[in-house]
Amino acid sequence: MNMEKSRINRKFGVIDVLIFLGIAVLLYIALTPAINGDIKPTDVGSSISTNISAIPFYMLKSVGRMAAAYVLSLIFTLIYGHIAAHNKKAERIMIPILDILQSIPVLSFLPAVLLGLMALFPKYNIGVELASIILIFTSQAWNMTFSFYNSIKLIPKDLDEASDVFRLNKWQKFRKLEVPFSMMGLVWNSMMSWAGGWFFLMTCEMFTMNGKTYALPGIGSYLQVAANEGNMKALFWGIISLIIVIILLDQLIWKPLNVWADKFKMELTQTEVPHSALLTLLRRSAIIGFLVEKIFKPIASIFGEKLDQTINKRNVKKKEKVNNKSGVVIKWIIRIVAIIVFLYAAINASKLIMKLSMDEILEIFPAVGATLLRVLAAQIIAIIWTVPVGVAIGLNKKLARILQPIVQIAASVPATALFPVLLLFLINKIGGLNIAAVILMLMGTQWYILFNVIAGAMAIPEDLKAAAKTFGITGIKKWKVLILPAIFPYLVTGMITAAGGCWNASIVAEYVTFGGKTVTTVGLGALISESTASGNFAMLLLSTLTMAIVVVAFNKIVWNRLYRLAEEKFKMEL
């Protein structure tokens, strides 16, 4: 009945005209510079123009890279998170690996990714473009994966048992229970992933390795060149343009997605439904209606049916072949190959690190201590303000309508673009780059905690809110018995990803180039940045391994225990 109603309401109108105009504008921006010969995007060595007229083309290139990286991140999230949540043996290996991956800075991936892809695609700049997309992916994927994994682990037993009663296979359970249940956290962490992508965009579009600089046309490289030249006018217009694009993305994509995701909220009481004017217009669009009804739904239906049949056949075969010796042999072969590869890599890594002098190795210890103190300071400051603000936004719909867009825009503006300006004011003050580094870490990673707290607060069922109101539970008691237990799993996820983000952000916070000068301070991030720029791969490897070890050890001692507590004590059941 609802479908018929939606078909009746669909008609060609203003939104369809705007869709056509939007496509035309994008095509014009994309094609005009190439046709006129103003920009040569295939030339890695070409200088990045700081002309304001180049901004639209650069912006389109950057958004395209961000979108490609996000698609990769989403696919990775759904596959990796699902396997880790359901396979206990794999979970013991996959979650520590995820801890390690999120702790490895973007620049540490650079040599292997760039050299490997340039060897595969030596012409037409494809290798460098793919390297940039993969580097952006490394700044987006981990928090989304942690969120999805955590959501699956927190699915109430009632719903899980109901899916078994209805005999849903793995694919049906995935799309009808697990993805919908995790949607609120996934959408908010998707916004955070885009914010993380913007944060590292300057690093991912223009990087120096072994004394050679690689620059791709994009708003990130534009801002980097403007900062290096001290061109405040170009920097100002680049930041303004970026803010405009961020506002447009918020209004055109994230706000409608947030409204759409609200329907997956787990509750029994009917509540006020959030509204998005754009989403309403899109639902009435004749073009969107045609694409959904005639193309996407039939394709999804055919794909879903075939996948269901395939999975059901595999399940039957598994039951018929309990003692599958060939499967056991294959598993052992994979294990042996993995061990051989690991030993080979470990031996070669040891040989490379042994080339370092003792003085170089000893630099690691004060660097670890300095960066650890900055990470802890940034984390403490972030928790102090993000928890109350996130809860206020998540629980108060009127406040959310005002502050949610502001928070999303603030989170998406790359702090690295504003950092050179901030550094001008702090460099000669007490603390200098040490204080500035903490501020940059805070600006880049506090949003991980805030977005997860908002998602956790919004996911609190109206039934529980109404019960608390009925029993007169308010103030501090309400925080103790309802709010903190409800948001705790989301808070832990946010703190884990924020901690990893802080370590990652140290590479740009402790090593800054502005106005043709490079400013550094003692820290592990500075060592990684210096090693990458100079091509000292032995020090890059040692400092990266050290950072990974510190982060994983901290996760084992602190975060894993909090994760277990969230799963065992604060799991919400129906």
Image: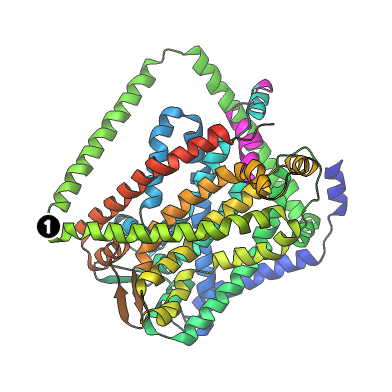
Place of residue 293 in the rendered image (x, y in percent of width and height, measured from the top left):
75, 47
290 horizontally vs 541: left or right:
right
Considering the whole magenta stretch, tell me its main secondary structure.
helix
Residue under the point 78% across and 43% down? 466
176 horizontally vs 316: left or right:
right
The three-letter code of the residue at mark 1 reads Met
Residue 507 quadrant:
bottom left
Residue 50 quadrant:
bottom left
Residue under the point 60% across and 71% down? 245
For residue 552, say whether it is visible: yes
Q: Nearer the viewer, residue 64 or 286?
A: 64
| Boundaries of the magenta span | 165-184
Q: Nearer the viewer, residue 161 or 327?
A: 161
84 horizontally vs 228: left or right:
right
Residue annotated with mark 1 = 358
Q: Nearer the viewer, residue 17 or 336?
A: 336
Residue under the point 71% across and 51% down? 260
User: Where is 329 relative to 126, above or below?
Assistant: above
Place of residue 181 in the rendered image (x, y in percent of width and height, measured from the top left):
64, 39
